[in-house]
Amino acid sequence: MSVLVLADIAATGVALATRQAVRAAQHWGLPVDLLVLGSTEAAAHAQIAGVRRVLHADAPRFAQPQAEDVARLLNSLAGDYTVILAAHGSLARNALPRVAALHDVGMISEAVALLGPNSYQRPIYAGNLLATVDNRPGLQILTVRASRFEAAAQGGQAECVAITAPAADGRSRVTGQKTAGGERPELGSARVVVSGGRSLGSAERFHACLAPLADRLGAAIGATRAAVDSGYAPNEWQVGQTGTVVAPDLYIAVGLSGALQHTAGIKDSRVIVAINQDPEAPIMQLADYSLVADLFDAVPELVRHLHTEATA
Ligand SMILES: Cc1cc2nc3c(=O)[nH]c(=O)nc-3n(C[C@H](O)[C@H](O)[C@H](O)COP(=O)(O)OP(=O)(O)OC[C@H]3O[C@@H](n4cnc5c(N)ncnc54)[C@H](O)[C@@H]3O)c2cc1C
C-alpha cells in the first residue's frame, strides 16, 4: 500500500506546501504518489524528491476545482492507498472530509506532528493546547499544517501517469474568482507578512501605511479580525484562529495587541517584529523584536530607511 498526497494549487509551479506535505507523507515509510489536478504542472511535480508517481487528472473543471469533484476523484483512487494526505489549504480541508465520510473513517484536521501510523498531534483551543489523537487503524485521511514540516527537496524523477477523473458532480459551479492579495504573494505561503490592527483607524490609513512597507519587502498584507470587522481590510486577509495560519520567515505586527486568537495564526513565524505604543501589549512578549513607538511615525520611517538602503 502507499500514500497519496493531493498537491496544493499554486498559480504556477510547485507550491511550497506540496513539498512540505510530501515530506510529511514520508512518515509512513511507504511509496508516495502525488495527485495533480490538470496536466500542465505534472512534470514539475515529478521533480519532487521521494515521489514515486505523479497522477494527473486533466479536465477543464480542474482549472477551478470544486471540493465535490476533487472528493469524487480521491474517492475513486482511495482503494489503492493507506493514507490520503494534503496540506491544510482551503480546497483540501473542504474535499478530504467528504472522502472520509464516504469511507466512514475519521478525518484528522491540521496535524502538526505525526506520532505513529495512526496517531497525531493537532492544535485545539486556538492553538493553546495540543491534542494527541489516536485514529482508528485502516485508511488514514488527514490534512497537515505544512509549515511544521521541512520541504522535500528537488531532484526526483517520478513517473507521470494520466488518469481519468469520474464524471463531474455538477451540483455547484464557480461564478467568479479573485485573488485575495492582488499582485502580492499569497498570505498563507508568503515569506514576509506585514499585518495591521484596529489602530490603523480606517481602510485608507490601513492601506496608505502598510502598502509601502509591504511593497518594499515583497510582503503579503494581513489583518486582525478587529481590523477586518471594522472594514479596513478584506476578510481574506484575516490572520489567526478563524483566519489564515501563516508561517513566514518574517512577520511584522503593526499596531495590533496580540490577542490569543490572532497569535494562534502566527506562532510558526520564524521572526516576529512588533510595533506597538504599549510596551505591555501581549504581542510585545511574543515578538523577537519589539519597537515601542507610534506606528504612524515608525512605519514611514522604516520605509524611508529601507528605501535608502536599497538605493545606497
Ligand atoms: C471566536 C473568536 C475568534 C477570533 N479569531 C480571530 C482571528 O482569527 N484573528 C484575529 O486577529 N482576531 C480574532 N479574534 C479577535 C481577537 O480576540 C481580538 O479582538 C483582535 O485580534 C484584536 O485586534 P487588534 O489587535 O487589531 O485590536 P486591539 O485589541 O484594539 O489592539 C490594538 C493595539 O494597537 C495598539 N495601538 C493603538 N494605537 C497605536 C499606534 N498609534 N501605534 C502603535 N500601536 C498602537 C494598542 O496598544 C493595542 O495593542 C477572535 C475573537 C473571537 C471571540
Image (cartoon, rainbow, N blue to C red):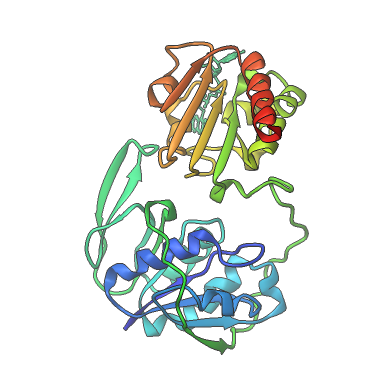
Please tell me whether residue 160 is drawn above or below residue 303 in the rendered image.
below
Split into 4 quadrants, where in the image is the C terminus? top right
Pick the front one: 309 or 39: 309
- Front one among 119 and 12: 12
- The quarter of the picture where residue 177 lies is bottom right
**Percent x, y of residue 129:** 29, 39
Residue at x 47% of width, y 45% of height: 247
Find residue 307 and report its horizontal and vertical position in percent: 69, 30
Quarter of the figure with the N terminus: bottom left
User: Which residue is painted at 50% across and 20% down in the image?
Assistant: 257
Residue 158 in the image: state x and y as whole percent: 47, 83
Q: Residue at x 60, y 12 (%)?
A: 294
Q: Is residue 257 above or below residue 15?
A: above
Q: Is residue 131 left or right of residue 151?
A: left
Q: How many marks?
A: 0
Q: Is residue 210 visible?
A: no
Q: Residue at x 67, y 26 (%)?
A: 303
Q: Position of residue 270 (x, y in %)?
A: 42, 40
Q: Residue 116 lies in what quarter of the image?
A: bottom left
Residue 78 in sight here: yes
